[in-house]
Image (cartoon, rainbow, N blue to C red):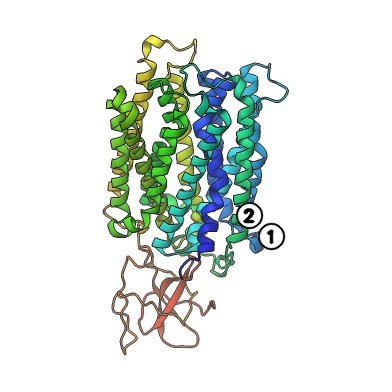
Amino acid sequence: MALSITTIFGYGVGHVLNDLCSAMWFTYLLIYFHHVMQFNNQLAGVVLLIGQIADGLSTPFVGAEADRTDDTKFCIKYGRRKTWHLVGCICVVCAFPFIFIGCIGCGSASVLAQVIYFAPFVIIFQFGWAATQISHLSLIPSITQDVNDRTVLNAIRYAFTVISNITVYLITWLTLGLGARGGGDHSTIGPNDATSFRIIVSIVLGIGFVFAALFHLLVKEDNVAVYTALPESEDCLPHCRMSWKDWFNEPQFYQIAVLYMSTRLFCNITQAYIPIYLQDSLHLPENSVAYIPLVMYSSGFLTAIAMKPVNKHLGRKVTYIIGALIGFAGCVWVWFGDGPLYIHYLLYIVAVLIGSGGSTMLVTSLSFTADLIGPNIESGAFVYGAMSFTDKLSNGLAVILIQSYAPCFKNETVNPNLFLSCSQFYRNVLAFLCSGFAILGILATLSLLPKKVGQRHRNVTYSEHTSVYSEHKIPTSDSIKSSDSPEIKSISSDTYSGITCYGTIKDSDSPEDRVIYPESNGYGINSQVVASGISGSSSTSDRKVED
């Protein structure tokens, strides 16, 4: 069944609040805490690292909790993932503004004391951000099992991410008056801009709140308690109903974790350091901090729109590799970029390459994650949480390492003689570090080539506990053939994401053995299909579950 426009739009705007805050977090946090709050380079990085660690630790917890089936009455009625989304939005709205309004009542305190003041707000914000992100992503397999529809949802989600980033840059440009002040090289952001940042964060949260409300009004979550209809058995369910522990036995879980981590590192590090590269490496006026990222995210928006036909004709793996190569080319060009021609013209091409490449990598990596989960949405939120954990922790460590070695900001503990000049340093960060992340993503994708994404590590045969079945559905796959005889001719191991859960049971109403096959029931849970006429190795009770 095709998704409605209302559902697609509602889902797309469900992450706008997070995207707006994320754009400010990665793009302006370091500039704000160093130039406005006058923190030194390392402590500004520590604030970001605290947030990344909090986010990383929150994501597996939120993922596991969002997959629980012993829901409260409110969660059952409203949807457990939408409930976590609501909790996350409340945390973000309540905590995020305090990060950008200064240290209330402690402006004259030491910088370390102010870091301690900001830490709780950063932690609450990042917990809320994680709750919103994981619950929103884990809704995709619940909404649709069609791979093309999943690509549409991921593409529309990223399209609104791009729009959100563009909105933040436009608001910042207008509020700070960068367009009017950009004519002089000595016009820089400083403590006098504290009020401007308060205005920016207020506008951002207002817009995000409206779109979060639209998401909760337009998107419905089917929270059918179908999980509990299956028997609790250690012999079967960990394979057909995957718990969070079972994912650690799947090699693709680690492969896609590396792919997703490298993608996020590429996107987030370029987002964080492109503005600094423009000012400290190329010495462009302040308005470049607005219009170059606008070019990046505009190209990313156009690329996101083209994702569905590209994925359909080329496949996810080829599409990802192409996107990574485009991003890699943009980063390499940064290394060679110099002179008036580059600054005035070619820089825009570099921005398009980095923006398009990052967009392609991100949309495709999210689709890979949805494919990995497949029908096992009972633990889908945990998978998204685990992927996000690797993303947040690696990004936090990368930023703190870069900040520790950056020679550009005043820091008496760093010996400038040990490093290259400021302009070379940020050029090298983009050229070598970010291009390395793109290469890592390509290697992770190549490791996935031998198998279909979502194919489980081993096939699993039902044991004596697999007497749950439904008799009125028969698989229609070409790999399962039947004629006048009820005998099943063949079974494809690729059916249902590579899990071949089959065995035989005896029914109390019939002397015949019955063979069972998994079939998605629309909620991603493996219900069993029964066909008569083939004998096997296991016989059990006569328990049935009606659809």
Does residue 414 lie above or below 450 as drawn?
above
Dot 2: element: helix
Q: Which residue is mark 2?
A: 83
The picture places residue 129, in percent across and down from the top left corner, at 57, 43
Which one is nearer the viewer's eye here, 422 or 496?
A: 422
Give the residue at x 28% y 31%: 333
- Mark carried by residue 470: none
Give the residue at x 37% y 19%: 423
Dot 1: element: helix
- Name of the residue lying farthest toward the bottom: 484
Name the residue type under label 2: Thr
Q: Are marks 2 and 1 in contact (CB under 8 Å)?
A: yes
Give the residue at x 46% y 60%: 376
Name the residue type under label 1: Phe
Residue 115 visible in the current orientation: yes
Q: Earlier in the sequence, mark 2 or mark 1?
A: 1
Does residue 536 lie above or below 213 as drawn?
below
Q: Which residue is mark 1?
A: 74
The picture places residue 514, in percent across and down from the top left corner, at 41, 81
The picture places residue 32, in percent across and down from the top left corner, at 56, 26
